[in-house]
Amino acid sequence: MSSSCPCGTGKSIDQCCGLYLSGQTYPNNAEALMRSRYSAYITGNIPYLKKTWHPDTCPELTSDDLHTNWLRLDVVRSKKGLKKSVVEFKAWFDEGDSERALHEISLFKLHKKRWVYVGPLDQWP
């Protein structure tokens, strides 16, 4: 029996983000991509993070970028578009004896017919 997916859908990882992280299929919308990227951070899947980041904004990623102890993901809202989409989320992490959240409004675009993460926006569009 597989464990629960880190992205918070309540599905098993094999029935959720594991399909994307293993390369069996690719997310067909920005929210699914954002959830799978969160799971990639949890599982340390740097190749997946690079593959799903827009080439114009993708930084160099190393295992040093994966030391955060992520606790849970809350999707606040998402806005679907034909060529670009936006997802607002809170990714909770452990900081010593307290929980903190990375709160981001993220821009995703279609690039070569696949959704990719572009970067944070200053405000909801």
Image (cartoon, grey):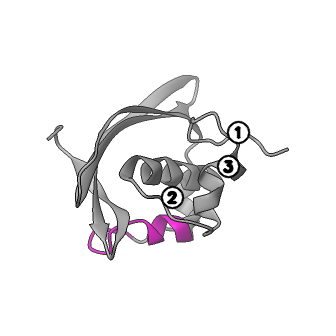
* First to last magenta residue range: 47-59
What x and y, as percent, mark residue 4? 70, 39
Q: Which residue has dot 3 on it? A: 15
Q: Is residue 94 left or right of residue 52?
A: right
- Do we see residue 106 in this rendering? no
Q: Nearer the viewer, mark 2 or mark 1?
A: 1
Tell me residue 35's x, y (percent). Answer: 49, 47
Depth check: 23 or 99 in front? 23
Give the mark nearer the N terminus: 2 vs 1: 1
Residue at 57% across, 36% down: 9
Q: Looking at the image, is mark 3 or mark 1 earlier in the sequence?
A: 1
Other-residue count near label 1 (Cα within 10 Å), few / some / many at <14 / 14–19 / ≥20: some
Q: Foreground: 57 or 24?
A: 24
Q: What residue appears at the point 65 percent right and 66 percent down from the top-left corner?
A: 22
* Residue denoted by label 1: 4
Which residue carries the number 2 mark?
65
Reply above or below: 53 against 35. below
Of residues 81 and 95, which is closer to you in this image? 81
Tell me, yes or no, if residue 86 can be seen here.
Answer: yes
User: Which of pointers 3 and 2 lies earlier in the amino acid sequence?
Assistant: 3
Q: SS class of the residue under badge 1? A: loop
Looking at the rendered image, the quarter that the N terminus falls into is top right
Where residue 63 is drawn, which disc sits there? none
Q: Residue at x 32, y 77 (%)?
A: 112
Does the stretch in magenta take in 57?
Answer: yes
Tell me the amino acid under the disc marked 2. Answer: Asp
Q: CA distance from mark 2 to mark 1?
A: 24 Å
